[in-house]
Amino acid sequence: MQILVTPRLTLRPPAVPDAEDIAAWLSERDVARMLSAVPHPYRLEDAERWIEDVRGRPADLVFTIHRKRLIGVVSIEKPEGEGADGAPRLGYWLGSRWHGHGFMTEAARCLLEHAFQTHGLSAVRSSVFLDNPASLAVQRKLGFVETGDGEIWSRSRQAMLARRNTVLTAEAFAAARAFSPHRNAA
């Protein structure tokens, strides 16, 4: 099992005992509403099914984020379906109790460093809902640049929502890391 460690966090692949915490945090309306694929309400069965699904995709980099207990998830996954551009996508969420403390920037930076160094990625894409400026701020800290706007279906909101698309190249990430005075800090 691959485990990644930062000064304040431990990242590891999801396991069956994580289902309760995942279901609890994704049941928070303010968390679920910022994710395109998550239903609301989110049940224990949804978390158990997601963990099983992740185990079936070993090429994806999916990690639970722990600080004494599970506080969120960060992942880099290959896109699925028709029209997928092939570039892996960064996705993430934190339970609302841990928002605003730099934990997601720290966790995502760790995963991106691992992915760029060990998986030979040239770029990672992501996106954020336009009404989620905190998530866009995380991506900007990591070196992502905005590439345009679009729309995506939100399961939790049951509506099409505007989103901002972003991309981070391996070169831009390395440059941002070299410039950062606090390599793992938020």
Image: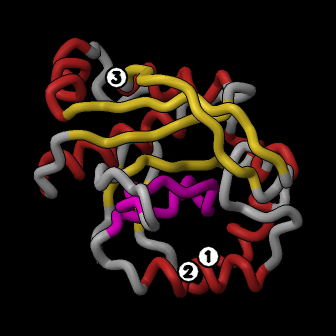
Q: Which residue is mark 1?
A: 18
Relative to residue 12, is residue 183 drawn left or right? left
User: What is the chief secondary structure element of the magenta stretch?
Assistant: strand
Q: CA distance from mark 3 to mark 1?
A: 30 Å
Check the image and name the residue furthest to the front: 82
Segment tinted magenta in the rendering: 60-79
Q: Nearer the viewer, mark 3 or mark 1?
A: 3
Instruction: Locate residue 92 relative to residue 147 in the image: left or right.
Output: right
- In the image, what residue occupies the spot 54% across and 57% down? 73
Camera-near label (1 vs 2) is 2
Percent of width and height locating residue 151: 64, 38
- What residue appears at the point 46 percent right and 67 percent down from the top-left corner? 81
In the rendered structure, are the residues bearing label 1 and label 2 in contact, judged by CB atoms less than 8 Å apart? yes
Whether 68 is among the magenta residues is yes
First reached walking from the N terminus: tag 3 or tag 1: 1
Q: Classify the position of the N terminus by image quarter.
A: bottom left
Cα–Cα span, label 2 and label 3: 29 Å
